[in-house]
């Protein structure tokens, strides 16, 4: 059986990233008048999978899954049960995420579009005996990969500084079989992926 090389897969992904970034915003957010509600309009190009509401410490307060495959999906987020303050709305897809800071007051939700951030999420591809990591940042920063065992102990750690793009391969063929957690820390967020070695 012939396998497509990881370089080919990553190349296609980066070409997709490039074309994707040229599209008009595929996620629109607006506050509904005199309410603590936010209306999200999601276009097919974004392929959103989850909508999260986070507090200042990045704890998940609300989570909604998106299962519709319609060309345009509209979702209402009711924040009336949250106290006044600052929060983040995080819209996630497989390859990208959008973070929109919001401010809740007594009677409304204030959204300032210029505070919105868009990031590409790290990609992990596991193959027999190794796994590949690829990531593109929106500015030069750091990227740290930490592999943790089931007990949370660090198996190994790899740090890249002053990078805009990361493509690395890690051998796992000599590691003990079991479940591991891959922790990927960027300049703006930490991501987790599960890794199973059989």
Image: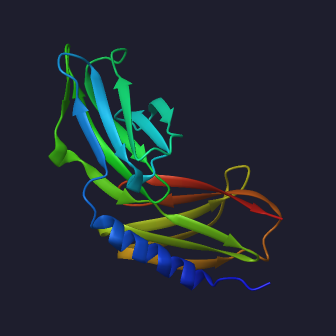
**Farthest front residue in view:** 71
Is residue 191 rendered to the left or right of residue 37?
right
Residue 26 spot, x, y in % from top left: 31, 52
Q: How is the image coloured?
A: rainbow
Dividing the image into 4 quarters, which one contains the C terminus? bottom right
Q: Quadrant of residue 102?
A: top left
Depth check: give the residue in front, 44 or 17: 44
Q: Against 176, is 74 above or below?
A: above
Q: Against 142, is 129 above or below?
A: below
Depth check: give the residue in front, 24 or 38: 24
Dividing the image into 4 quarters, which one contains the N terminus? bottom right
Is residue 186 rendered to the left or right of residue 106?
right
Residue 186 spot, x, y in % from top left: 41, 61
Q: Residue at x 52, y 77 (%)?
A: 10
Q: Residue at x 36, y 44 (%)?
A: 42
> How many numbered circles are shown?
0
Q: Is residue 162 visible?
A: no
């Amino acid at each position: 059986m012939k396998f497509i090389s990881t370089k080919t897969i990553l190349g296609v992904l980066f070409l997709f990233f490039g074309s994707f970034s040229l599209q008009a915003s595929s996620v629109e957010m607006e506050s509904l008048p005199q309410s603590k509600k936010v209306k999200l309009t999601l276009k097919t190009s974004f392929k959103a999978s989850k909508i999260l509401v986070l507090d200042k410490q990045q704890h998940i307060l609300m989570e909604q899954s998106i299962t519709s495959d319609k060309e345009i999906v509209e979702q209402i987020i009711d924040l009336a049960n949250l106290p006044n303050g600052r929060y983040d709305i995080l819209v996630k897809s497989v390859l990208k995420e959008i973070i929109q800071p919001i401010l809740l007051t007594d009677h409304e939700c204030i959204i300032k579009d210029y505070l919105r951030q868009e990031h590409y999420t790290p990609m992990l591809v596991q193959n027999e005996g190794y796994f590949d990591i690829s990531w593109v940042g929106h500015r030069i920063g750091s990227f740290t990969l930490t592999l943790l065992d089931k007990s949370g102990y660090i198996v190994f750690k790899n740090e890249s500084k002053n990078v805009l793009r990361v493509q690395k391969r890690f051998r796992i063929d000599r590691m003990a079989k079991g479940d591991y957690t891959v922790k990927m820390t960027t300049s703006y967020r930490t991501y987790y992926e599960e890794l199973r070695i059989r």
